[in-house]
Image (spheres, rainbow, N blue to C red):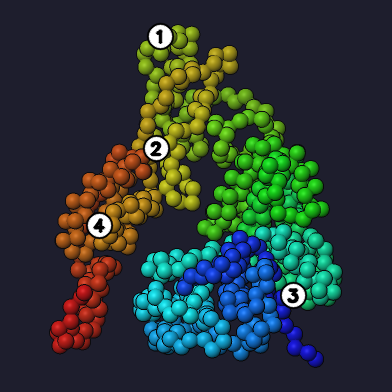
Amino acid sequence: MENYIVSARKYRPATFESVVGQRALTTTLKNAIATGKLAHAYLFCGPRGVGKTTCARIFAKTINCQHPTPDGEACNECESCRAFNEHRSYNIHELDAASNNSVDDIRQLVEQVRIPPQIGKYKAYIIDEVHMLSASAFNAFLKTLEEPPQHAIFILATTEKHKILPTILSRCQIYDFQRIGVEDIVAHLAYVASKEGITAEPEALNVIALKADGGMRDALSIFDQVISFTGGHITYQQTIENLNVLDYEYYFRLTDFLLANQVGDALLLFNDVLNKGFDGNHFITGLASHFRDLLVSTDAATLPLLEVGASIRQRYGEQARKCPLPFLYRAMKLCNDCDLNYRTSRNKRLLVELTLIQLAQLTSDNEEEPGGHSPRPVIKPITQQAAAPQQPVTAQPQAAPQQPQAEARQPKPQPQPARQAQEQPGAQAATTHVASVLNAQKAEGKKIPVVDKGRLGISIRHAQAEEKPYDPAPATAPAQVSEPLPEEDYIFNERDINYYWQEYAGRLPHEQVAMAKRMQHMRLTLLNDTTFEAVVDNPIVAKEFNELAPAIQDYLRTRLKNRKVTMTVRVSEPSERVRAYGRDEQFQMMSQKNKALLELKDEFGLEFA
């Protein structure tokens, strides 16, 4: 059995002409060789797998060719070219800076530079992954890189140019390699497939090119993987199955559902995608890319930005004509927001489903947003429920103090002023009845509780619509409240005040980090409805909290919407167990349990840094 060679090595370019997607750089290098204007140091930088090291080897081979071709390529017939092709050339030295990044490695390289070439004019030194060199190695390399011997040419290659010292960059000619286009990758893969006797559908090669993300080496590696899966006949369906890629068909169907406001069908399709093993983040990013492709398909000027196969272009054009531009703008914004929030979300599936519901409701009406930029974060009801008929209820004045709990939670309106009573003389009887009901509520001493939303202490600032009191006379309408109700003091519990206490600690400036750490480890106790207690372990800390108490009280009163919030500070009793916050306090507690720590500290004169 003959040795197998992967396509990335077997079809590695050997001439400038065979390098894919870097026409401008290869032309510049060939012209420099033809005119004899060679620099002493070059820096090839760019993404992985785009041809940096390959171009460095071709360049090193060509500058020593004794009979170059008219178009600036190596002849592959002279002794220098044959030595290079047979891997026995002494004029080309490669150094992997990832594993040889010390000062000693660079010093050995500098000593080799002094030896002139035996065949040819130049000795080329290719240093791959040069950004891995240490700072000391860079400094040891500076002088030689700036003034090397006439026969030495350095070619540095890196994927991270920003990690190289500016003093190195200033001594090199910099060549920025770009990502290879999808069309160029597809054409090269088709060439390799024809050489290997493999049949491949253009759509399948396009999927491989998109998956490679601009790297030819990655594309050829994926190509070999798909060949092993398909057995030599590459189809689109087998390719997306092997590479775990979502089919275009899902996104086309989903977009039709969204345009038709079919929320249920959209959610079912998303469930089908999850059942096939795809991740929700992968699905939502693919949907955003689909909307982007639809957007560029709406205009002939942006159509070249559509990187899909020829057979899919027509479907994109047909669906793009159905999509209004505001829908595409808002859909991309919603998908992008979902992508940003996906990592931090605890219920990731619900996040994607909410996004799909909002997308399905973008075309439900023709209202334009103010400014037309961000979609409204409003989710409309999916199904319309019929309103229940109202049943007349006969009021019982004696049962007014015994209101249900839901009604008692409503805010306590104040009696209407005399001016309003004068303006509505016809409703005098109803106003008197409302005042009696309100007085009964006031006698109970009820206050608006904090809404129990995850027990986070979030409160409703304005109550909802005021409930109408029962009126024994159906013909008489209740008085309407025209002025806004004054704000009341909200009740809160111990969990609410601890939540906003931690929130205040998180907003303290960096200069008060010690105080913030203490507050984060404290647990407040509620003494009564409005007074809470903070227990500290020594008077010094108590003094600091007393100085900060007015600011804390103002903050908690604002967040809890209660003007009577009061803070008290108490030093703990000796019998109480208070958690240690600082290193000194932790050491004191540890030394109480183990006296040997104090002896160790005194013996060696140890102190806290």
Q: Nearer the viewer, residue 487 or 180?
A: 180
Cα–Cα span, label 1 and label 2: 30 Å
603 left or right, relative to 409:
left
| Disc 4 packing (10 Å; few <14; some 14–19; many ≥20) | few
| Disc 1 packing (10 Å; few <14; some 14–19; many ≥20) | few
Q: Nearer the N terminus, badge 3 or badge 1?
A: 3
Residue 405, visible in the rendered structure: yes
Label 2 sits on residue: 447
Q: Nearer the N terminus, badge 4 or badge 1?
A: 1
Q: Nearer the viewer, residue 324 or 205?
A: 205
Q: Nearer the N terminus, badge 3 or badge 2?
A: 3
Residue type at the position of mark 3: Asp
Kindly report which numbered mark, 3 or 1, lies closer to the viewer in this rendering.
3
Kindly report which numbered mark, 2 or 4, lies closer to the viewer in this rendering.
4
Disc 1 element: helix
Residue 265, visible in the rendered structure: no
Residue type at the position of mark 1: Gln
Cα–Cα span, label 2 and label 4: 39 Å
Compared to 63, does 387 lie above or below? above
User: Which percent across, then down, holds residue 49?
Assistant: 61, 70
User: Which percent across, then down, holds residue 184?
Assistant: 71, 61
Cα–Cα span, label 3 and label 2: 72 Å
* Residue farthest to the bottom, as pictured: 1
Q: Nearer the N terminus, badge 1 or badge 2?
A: 1
Residue type at the position of mark 4: Glu
State the mark number for residue 422: 1
Task: Tell me whether the residue at label 2 lies in contact with that at label 4, contact meaning CB atoms closer than 8 angstroms.
Answer: no
State the mark number for residue 511: 4
Label 3 sits on residue: 224
Residue type at the position of mark 2: Lys
